[in-house]
Structures are given as structure tokens and as C-alpha cells.
Image: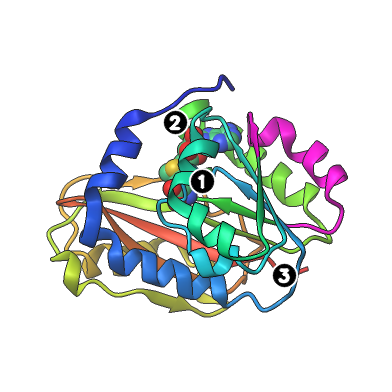
């Protein structure tokens, strides 16, 4: 995949302000729920860390940020430089495709944990093929056997009329995490979905039965994303 900067994404994130506060707080809670100590975090698709928790970053001696956006390293430092400087954390930036660089990164950092930070849900936009995306996502899972890894990603998105301040995060138990249609219906109702919704084809990311949180994200006014967040069991 070619390197590029999506300035409309950065502008939207910069502009979102308080509308994303609840989502950020839920993401922070989920990140901090991972109790295992690791020296290094490989952060895939971290962008400028618009939704990243500074307190989570401070847990690591080294954060290796991998993103196709050549500006991601500078913007991430701009947003999180203070937190990084006040603690022991150093940031390394590698510009490139996470799929291509995954094996090399795993070999270079044999004890690192990994976080796929809200980009796997974009895969169908690149492949334009649900089957191909499912294969790519399953391949990631296979390569990560034996590692601690987590992912936050789009599961569904579409128009909804729920006031963002009244949305709620869902904690799903082991069985519910895999239930397709009933889950989608309940999630749609909770944001007062209207019109057509997109299934991002990310249901294959976790092993069936993984415990996940479903986090609502009002990307722009009137448009909701349901993010699925989970830590894979090793
Ligand atoms: C929705 S943004 C991520 C938001 C980020 N987690 C944050 O808190 O700001 C998606 C990011 O993934 C990056 N990205 C998309 N596909 C990628 C790939 N194949 N490899 C690496 N980065 C990728 C994009 O450049 C973008 O920075």
C-alpha cells in the first residue's frame, strides 16, 4: 500500500473536540484493562494518536508507531510529546504498510505487545473485496499466535440520530461477541440508526468467544461507528 496523508481525517479529528470525549474515555478504560507489563508496544495505524490515552503510552519504554501516513510520527509527537517526555517512553516511527511490515516488526521486537489502533476496519476500502479482507485479517491473527495483541476497529457504521452525549458503551461477554445479526440489531437501535449501515467485515479479527467492548463513536454529527475493542487471548 502506498504511503499517504489523509488530511481530512486529521482535520476532522482536530475539530471533533468534546464530541469524541466519551469515546476517548471508553477507549482509555479498555486500553488500561490490559494488565500485563511489556517493555515495547508496536502501535499499528496510530496516526497522530487522536484517540490514544497518554497514560497507556507511559506504560512502555518504547513505542514503535507504524503508519502509512508520513506525517504520523511528527503529529503523534505534537499531541503526545509532553506525556512521552515526562515519562520513560521513547517513540520510534516507521512509515509503511502494517501488513508488509508486521513480520519484520515481530522479529525485531520479540517481546513487544501489539495494538491495531483503528485501521483494520478500513481494509475493505482498500481491497474492495470482503473475501480478500477476511483472508488478510485471518492471516494477521495466525502471525500473532503466542503474542499479546489487541485491536480497536470499525465493526459497523452508518447514520443515526442518538444524541452523542447519551450513547453508552457495551461490554460483551464471551458468547455474545460472535452473535452477528441480533448484535447488529441491538447496536443499531441504541444509536437510533436510520438508513443504510455498513458492515466492515471485521468479525473475523478475534477468535470466536473473545470478550470485547463495543464503543460508540460519533465520527461526524449524525454518523456513528461501532468500534469493537478486544485483547486476544494467548
Ligand atoms: C482512523 S485512523 C487511526 C486513528 C488513530 N488510532 C488515532 O487515534 O488517531 C487510521 C490510520 O491508519 C493508517 N493506516 C491505514 N491503513 C494502514 C496500513 N495498511 N498500514 C499502516 N497504517 C495504515 C492511516 O494512515 C491512519 O493514520
**Which quadrant is home to the N terminus?**
top right
Q: Are marks 3 and 2 in contact (CB under 8 Å)?
A: no
Question: As drawn, is 140 to the left or to the right of 82?
Answer: right
State the SS at label 2. Answer: helix
For the point 22% across and 45% down, which residue is it?
A: 196
Give the x, y percent position of residue 206.
62, 59
Residue nearest the observer in this picture, 199 or 76: 76
Asked if residue 153 can be seen in this view, the reply is no
- Disc 3 target residue: 233
State the SS at label 3. Answer: loop
Disc number for residue 77: 1
For the point 56% across and 68% down, which residue is it?
A: 56
Q: Residues within 10 Å of mark 1 (few under 14, many from 20)?
A: some
User: Is 208 rendered above or below residue 76?
Assistant: below
Residue nearest the observer in this picture, 219 or 233: 219
Q: Is residue 101 magenta?
A: yes
Q: Residue furthest top?
A: 2
What's drawn in magenta, residue-wise? 93-113
**What is the distance, in whole Å, between disc 1 and disc 2 at their CAs?**
28 Å
Label 1 lies in ligand 1 vicinity (Cβ under 8 Å): no
**Which quadrant is home to the C terminus?**
bottom right
Label 1 or label 3, whichever comes before in sequence order: 1
Amino acid at each position: 500500500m502506498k504511503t499517504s496523508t489523509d488530511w481530512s481525517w486529521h482535520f476532522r479529528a482536530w475539530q471533533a473536540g468534546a464530541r469524541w470525549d466519551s469515546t476517548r474515555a471508553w477507549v482509555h478504560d479498555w486500553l488500561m484493562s490490559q494488565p500485563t507489563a511489556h517493555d515495547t508496544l508496536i502501535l499499528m495505524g496510530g496516526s497522530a494518536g487522536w484517540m490514544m490515552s497518554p497514560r497507556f503510552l507511559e506504560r512502555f519504554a518504547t513505542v514503535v508507531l507504524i503508519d502509512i501516513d508520513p506525517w504520523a510520527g511528527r503529529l503523534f509527537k505534537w499531541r503526545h510529546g509532553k506525556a512521552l517526555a515526562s515519562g520513560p517512553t521513547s517513540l520510534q516511527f516507521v512509515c509503511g504498510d502494517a501488513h508488509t511490515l508486521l513480520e519484520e516488526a515481530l522479529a525485531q521486537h520479540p517481546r513487544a505487545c501489539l495494538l491495531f489502533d483503528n485501521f483494520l476496519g478500513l481494509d475493505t476500502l482498500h481491497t474492495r473485496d470482503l473475501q480478500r479482507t477476511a483472508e488478510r485479517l485471518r492471516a494477521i491473527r495466525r502471525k500473532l499466535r503466542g503474542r499479546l495483541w489487541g485491536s480497536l476497529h470499525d465493526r459497523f457504521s452508518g447514520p443515526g440520530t442518538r444524541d452523542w452525549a447519551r450513547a453508552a458503551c457495551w461490554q460483551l461477554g464471551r458468547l455474545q461477541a460472535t452473535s452477528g445479526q441480533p448484535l447488529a440489531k441491538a447496536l443499531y437501535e441504541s444509536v437510533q440508526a436510520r438508513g443504510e449501515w455498513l458492515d466492515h467485515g471485521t468479525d473475523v479479527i478475534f477468535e470466536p468467544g473473545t470478550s470485547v467492548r463495543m464503543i460508540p463513536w460519533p465520527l461526524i454529527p449524525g454518523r456513528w461507528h461501532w468500534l469493537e475493542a478486544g485483547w486476544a487471548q494467548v
